[in-house]
Amino acid sequence: MLGEVATISRGGNFQKKDFAESGVPCIHYGQIYTRYGLYADKTISSISNEAAQKQKFAQPNDIVMAVTSENVEDVCKCVAWVGNEPIAVSGHSAIIHHNQNAKFLTYYFHTSMFLEQKRKLAHGTKVIEVTPDKLNGVKIPLPSLAEQERIVAVLDKFDALVNDLSEGLPAEIEARKRQYEYYRDKLLSFKKIA
């Protein structure tokens, strides 16, 4: 169970109106849906030092999960915080503090297996919510840290191929070129088959 390897707490209470030009780095739950991928080492927003004094913080390797959404599919979207400093976290979020591979857990939280579990935890009609304390009962696969790192390395490569045009598109073009050459050579081979 997630609660056996993690401490889950609610985020703070700042809002978008509290954003500042500089100050303490922060993640607002709405940005998890629109501005972040699976992990981040830099935030796109900050709040003032004064506003930060009343906030809750995610530490490096924590996961920030949006626990409020408009639909069940999007609720619990999360981002692994892989930066080097604590960051303020807004309300409607859960901070998952653990000693596992943050990217491994984040990849898991985007699977159909997790979707089945969160469907049972989600409540609401117009606004769908999963309360952070209910996340304690989520079942997670937990291989060794070395195996988690291996799985993350494989998934990161696939993610780069699929989502990074500068890397993925040339690799796909090269694969299609090799496939074309293979079939061209086979089709144009006029050797008699004995």
Image: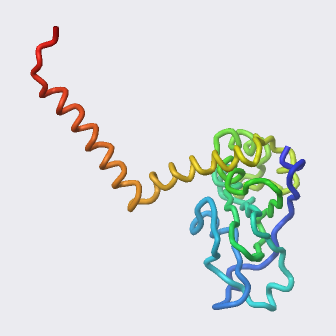
Count how many numbered circles sit on residues in the image.
Answer: 0
Of 66 and 188, nearer the camera is 188
In the image, taking residue 92 as reference, residue 157 lies left or right, namely: left
| Residue for point 71% across, 58% down | 127
Of 64 and 102, nearer the camera is 102
Q: Tell me which corner region of the image, top left, top right, bottom left or bottom right, holds residue 31.
A: bottom right
Asked if residue 7 is positioned above or below residue 84 in the image, the reply reads above
| Residue for point 77% across, 63% down | 62
Q: Position of residue 23 (x, y in %)?
A: 71, 89
In the image, taking residue 49 as reference, residue 104 lies left or right, namely: left
In the image, taking residue 60 as reference, residue 188 lies left or right, namely: left
Q: Position of residue 106 (x, y in %)?
A: 68, 54
Q: Position of residue 155 (x, y in %)?
A: 57, 48
Q: Position of residue 90 (x, y in %)?
A: 76, 73
| Residue for point 73% across, 79% down | 15
Asked if residue 23 is positioned above or below residue 152 in the image, the reply reads below
| Residue for point 76% across, 65% down | 93
- The scheme the figure's colours follow is rainbow
Of 16 and 187, nearer the camera is 187
Query: In the picture, which quadrant includes the N terminus?
Result: top right
Query: In the picture, which quadrant includes the C terminus?
Result: top left
